[in-house]
Amino acid sequence: MGAYLRGIHTPHRKSTKKSPVIRIDIPETVTIPMSMHIGKPAVPTVKSGDLVKVGTKIGISDGYISSDIYSSVSGKVVKLTDYLMYNGATTTAVVIESDGEMTPDSSITPPTINSQKDLVDAVKEAGIVGLGGAGFPTYVKLNVDPERIDYLIINGAECEPYVTSDTVTMSTRTDDMILALKALNRYLGVKNVIIGIEKNNKKAAKHMKEMAASINDFSVKIQSLPDVYPQGGEKVLIYHTTGRKITANKLPIDVGCIVLNCTTIAAIGTYLRTGMPLVEKCVTVEGGAVKQPQNVIAPIGTSIKDLFDCCGGLTEQPAKIVYGGPMMGISVPNSDFSIIKNTNAVLALTKKEAKLPKTTACIRCGACVNTCPFSLAPVSIAEAYTKKNAAILTELAVLSCMECGCCSFVCPANRPLVQLNKLAKQFVNEEAKKEAQKQ
């Protein structure tokens, strides 16, 4: 029990929480990667010179764990090109020159839903993935035996500093959330919905309580969560809302739970209402170098530079540009990168904000263990990784690490513990693949 209650208090710095959301001007070009989800990249269905509309399918899922991809603007396909993702992987991207019209594809029409299969197929067709950051294809989560579902847990725990795009969703898209929840109730038999929101996010809680009060057919409960990072972690959220624990190698459905981000729920509702697949995203644009921080709705594939320009430009050359929040986000070398389906924030940090403290020797204080939600031992993991000992890393349950960054945050020696955990996880997976190939 105690481990799931651990975590850290981070500075919130959510200056955009009360700012109105704006819609970006139509970008001249968008660059849409074929890998914006966990699983196999989509296969391009267009070629250079093709004309596309908003909602035209430009990438088809390649396998069960994959996702369809759609054009976010109307215009002409300029080229298909190799594209370096923010995580270092390379994929194919479709570059589209906008015609400035944003004409919707003529095939766009709301889906007809009469069964669970229809609903699952619709969510798949919409190209919806986990929009809180994970990017897991949502239809896979919904393709389960309804008898196994005790709770649908909606993740509204926007615990990363700076990020407020989910708060915007919960404040402005309640109609679509209601539509999705009613469909999940009718076709998956979901009877108990829990919306987890940190206790300091009173604005979102107010809107969600009003939404819950309008639903009479099934239970919708607003669960106030401790104001401790990382509340948004799936296992942590399930424990704090239901008291249930997920052991290693188990999934939420194994304890009767499905977890979906609040923006994912809204995206399902939007598709059911309009038939328009996932083609745009609300992104928090923040950081000390941003002139006018705010939440921006932009077509998927919009460059980070265009987002900065939409917010009045930069006050200075950023020392670091980050995809996501400062705890779990990944820095990128420039602002040419595109926002993708699961981008919830981009940060332009000043030299002062991005300055890394000097790393010193580990003093064996145990702070990293005491704050880890799963009681992992980052120091021991770092030692085992240095020795390239996959067996010990497995014993230390390194694959259970959710990469939340609590260990690095509290380390008085300022050691890159979470970075080493990531490398250790990659090493263990690579070693496992080598062993499988031998057999």
Image (spheres, rainbow, N blue to C red):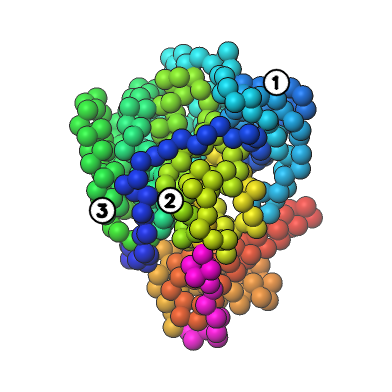
Q: Earlier in the sequence, mark 1 or mark 3?
A: 1
**Does label 2 or label 1 sit earlier along the sequence?**
1
Label 2 belongs to which residue?
293
Residue drawn at (42%, 41%) of the image: 261
Amino acid type at circle 1 is: Leu
* Pointer 3 residue: 199
Say how many tags the image has.
3
Say left or right for 341 vs 239.
right
Mark 3 or mark 2, whichever is nearer to me: 2
Range of the magenta residues? Answer: 350-364
Of helix, strand and loop, which one carries label 3? loop
Q: Nearer the viewer, residue 369 or 306?
A: 306
Dot 1 surroundings within 10 Å: few (below 14), some, or many (20 or more)? Answer: some
Question: Residue 124, relative to residue 108: is it above or below?
Answer: below
Instruction: Relative to 112, say whether 8 is above or below.
Output: below
Q: Quadrant of residue 39?
A: top right
For label 3, count other residues whose C-alpha is less than 10 Å away and answer few (under 14), some (14-19) or many (20+): some
Q: Position of residue 158 (x, y in %)?
A: 38, 50
Q: Residue at x 58, y 61 (%)?
A: 317
The residue lying at 44 percent from left, 83 percent from top is 365
Residue 332 or 130: which is nearer the viewer? Answer: 332
Type of amino acid under label 2: Pro
Residue 26 in picture, x, y percent from top left: 56, 32
- Magenta run includes residue 352: yes
Q: Is residue 46 at all visible to an observer of this figure? A: yes
In this picture, residue 258 sits left or right of residue 349: left
Q: What secondary structure is marked by label 2?
A: loop
Mark 3 residue type: Lys
Distance from label 3 to label 2 (Cα)? Answer: 24 Å
Report how far apart the C-alphas of labels 2 and 1 lie in the structure.
35 Å
- Which label belongs to residue 51? 1
Task: Give the spatial CA distance, label 1 vs label 3.
Answer: 48 Å
